[in-house]
Image (spheres, rainbow, N blue to C red):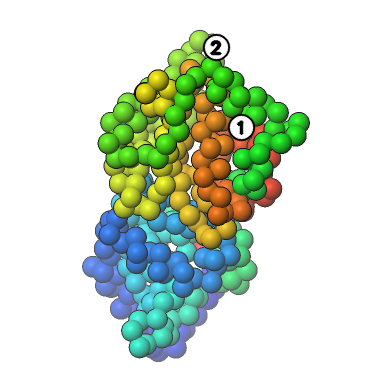
Amino acid sequence: MLWFFNHCHNSRTLLATWINSHVSSLLTSLTVHDRLRFEQALTCTREGGATSLATWAFAPHMIWQDMFAYAWTEIDGWWCLFAEYSDGLFMPLPPLGPCPQGEFHPSCAFKDVVQHVIEYMMTHNKGSAVTRIENVPEELKPRLYELGFTLREKDPDYLYRRQDLVDLKGDRYKRPRAACNRFLRENRAQYRPYDVMDRDECLALFHRWTAQKEAQHAQAGMPSDILARYMLEDAEPAHRCILQSSDALGLVGRVICVDGAICGYTFGYERSPDVFCILAEVVDRTLSGAAQFLFREFCGDMESYPFINTMDDSSLTSLARSKRAYHPVRLVSNFIATP
């Protein structure tokens, strides 16, 4: 990136030098108490109101604290989130903001703050290719292209018209509609809000759900998908965090019970006034139609939102197939930017 090596105005050079030497000491570990600060920065971000990407929210990052060490800092009104793992340091989101600081308006432009954080990461990572900015929305691509970044696509999010998922009208929704009807016909079901007192029972369901997936593969003589297995193992701490801290994370939760026992749970959050995101869904696999029923009812509850985002498919063929079966109105593009 040629602009990285051009001589800057003296004040910018001094600022960059100061940031590189002090940013490590200024980094603050991300906690649930940072949610308000994060959301304020998001509202100040031009692209924040335009993108429907599910990752432009607090909960999808906070729940993965067992996999990544998240930390943040502010640079002249810009809120910068970092994540570190064994390979190095990266940004799971572009810089957010800028937000006014008291009576002062930020003087640091987007290109300047991006230059500072990239230089810091490259120094920290000792030149490793791990340096990157993830979850770049379509709306931000032109600005990063101008700065010389390379952008490659990630798995897109699936965006649906909410009313379609509730009505399930027509031949194209014949199968999920029939599955819902079968579940109601064969079970005495109760659908209700999640309560933290449900935590242990839901966590037991999560472990039963993962074991059922392994057993189904074994019975069918199918080799277990190694990537899917690792993802399920990694998901356990994330689900534990969701179940324990749903209120602090700003999540809405629902459960379904059959004969008084919880057989499914789901959680989501508001991404924007128009978009509600489904973050997690776990259902007993032995109950035919339970997943379709829970999904339909949850979408029905979110009546103030025109659209539902079910996040990406993690490059899993079976998950992609099930998400396409509900006929998304759009795939929301997502990119990784590297210098």
**Where does the image place residue 195, in percent across and percent down from the top left?**
32, 39
Q: Quadrant of the N terminus?
A: bottom right
Q: Distance between the residues labelled 1 and 2?
A: 19 Å
The answer to which of 189 and 323 lies nearer the viewer is: 189
Seen at 50% across and 56% down, the residue is: 271
Res 277 visible: yes
The answer to which of 7 and 242 lies nearer the viewer is: 242
- 237 versus 143 height, above or below: above
Q: Is residue 305 left or right of residue 37?
A: right
Q: Is residue 308 left or right of residue 28?
A: right
Q: What residue type is labelled 1?
A: Ser
- Residue for badge 2: 220
Question: Is disc 2 surrounded by few (<14), some (14 to 19) or many (20+) residues within 10 Å?
Answer: few
**Where residue 322 is drawn, which disc sits there?**
1
- 209 versus 298 height, above or below: above
Quick one: label 1 or label 2, which is nearer the N terminus? 2
Q: What residue type is labelled 2?
A: Ala
Res 337 visible: no
**Where does the image place residue 257, in percent across and percent down from the top left?**
41, 27
Q: Is residue 199 left or right of residue 151?
A: left
The image quadrant of residue 316 is top right
Question: Is disc 1 surrounded by few (<14), some (14 to 19) or many (20+) residues within 10 Å?
Answer: few
Seen at 46% across and 69% down, the residue is: 43
Indicate which label's residue lies in the foreground, 1 or 2.
Answer: 1
